Image (cartoon, helix red, strand yellow):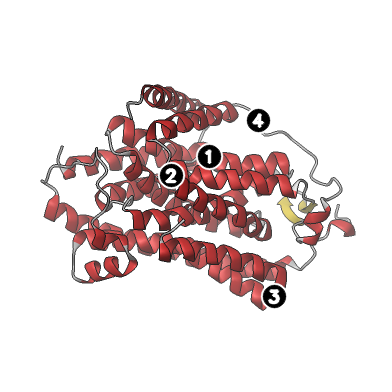
Amino acid sequence: MTIWLLALLLMVGSFGAGLLGALTGLGGGLVIVPMMTLLFHIDLRYAIGASLVSVIATSSGAAAAYVREGYTNVRIGIFLEVATTIGALVGAALAGFIPTSALAVLFGLVLLYTAYRSFRAPDEHPVDLPSDPLAVRLKMNSTYPTAGGMRPYSVQGVKGGFALMFVAGILSALLGIGSGIVKVLAMDRTMKLPFKVSTTTSNFMIGVTAAASAGVYLHRGYIEPVISFPVMLGVLSGALLGARILAGARTLWLRRLFTAVVVVLAVEMLYKGLRGGL
Amino acid sequence: MSSPQFAPQSPDGHDHRVEQIVGRLLQLGVLLAAAVVLIGAIALLVQYGRDIAGFQLFHGENAALTSIKGIITAAFHGDSRGIVQLGLLLLITTPIARVALTLVAFVIQRDRLYVVTTGIVLILLLYGLIWGRA
């Protein structure tokens, strides 16, 4: 395959991943690495490098829009970024020692979990329970916009959220993904933030987490320009288009389609990982 | 609706305005990085497009393109792979710049706790990017 053809195919695939990722809210990063390794037989390390770069591009672009809406909680984001960046550096250090077959199995499990979660509606939970005292000391409690004006919320489980964020950072570095699913799990289920605040603050953090390990991988030669440019440009343009048409889109069948793709990729990754074929 | 005990501990208005400016800069950073990558990509395809791609096996990146100094040198010598890599480097520094600007915002607000917290995140990020160790 010539470089022209590889770049073209990667760009088309990444565009589709970015578009579906934005429309379904599940993020495109999750399917980029399996696409590159399973379809194009690209080495896992190059795939992870290219995927991290595309994750930074989409998260940084989208985060700016969310901040304007007033949902993002910058203090919570920065505080939890201590955990995700340490996790990302630990993950990058571990990456050199973990066999790629084990990483493929881990990837398969994360994909399956994502598919499972995507069909469960976010739990409605009260957002005005008495605050975790630690959250008061860390000045995390804030307000968010609702139809009836700005509404206050208080924060629970700060320590648990911090621990889960450490795990999210490790997964992000090991697999080259944004780990948005674990970040939302920490903020929505453990810290009991309003759902919109969880998702937007998570987006705010994803780029920073990915930058921590991408910096390390750049020095290790994981970031290959020939592979990274079609992926970055493809995912970014797909995500930008997705964000534009999101307003009027019927997303239920798209979500089903995307989830089906995720399940197929999960099975393939598990199979390849267990047989040692990746 | 709002009860005093849940009111934010510091006025969020200021916070929010700073964050909007930071958000804009962040978008500009991504667009600039994408433009540099695109220019490099076109040059790269013209130059090497017909070569056979071989990325099934990991051989690491050319040593010149794995350090910040090497990437900048290559890009300013007009090397197409160097230009793409420079764009990717710009992209990686964009969220780091955001953390740096957030640090400035907390300094202006004299929020010592979050100056320290943001400083820790910034040091961790720079450590990874500049020394490349984890």
**Pointer 2 indicates a residue of which chain?**
A
Q: Residue furthest right?
A: B4
Asked if badges 2 and 3 are on one and the same chain, I answer: no
The reply to whether label 1 and label 2 mark residues of one chain is yes
Gap between marks 3 and 1 measured at Cα: 34 Å
Q: Which residue is mark 2?
A: A95
Q: Are marks 2 and 4 in contact (CB under 8 Å)?
A: no
* Circle nearer the viewer, 1 or 2: 2
Measure the alpha-carbon separation of dots 2 and 4. Answer: 33 Å
Question: B65 or B12, which lies in front?
Answer: B65
Q: Secondary structure at mark 4?
A: loop
Three-letter code for the amino acid on which mark 2 is drawn: Ala
Cα separation, mark 4 vs mark 3, equals 39 Å
Mark 2 or mark 4: which comes first in sequence? 2
Q: Position of residue B125 (x, y in %)?
A: 50, 62
The answer to whether the residues at label 1 and label 4 have Cβ atoms under 8 Å apart is no
Q: Amino acid at mark 1?
A: Gly
Left or right placement of residue A255 versus residue A150 in this view: left
The residue at 38%/64% (across/down) is: B90
Instruction: Give the mark nearest the N terminus, 1 or 4.
Output: 1
Q: Is residue A77 above or below residue A265?
A: below
Q: SS for tag 1? A: loop
Residue A178 visible to an observer of this rendering: no
Q: Which mark is residue A121?
A: 4
Q: Which dot marks residue A73?
A: none
Real-space CA distance between mark 1 and mark 4, rounded to the nearest whole angstrom? 13 Å
Q: Is residue A51 left or right of residue B15?
A: left
Indicate the chain on which mark 1 is placed. A
Label 1, on which residue?
A: A25
Packing grade of label 2 (10 A; few <14, some 14-19, many >=20) is: some
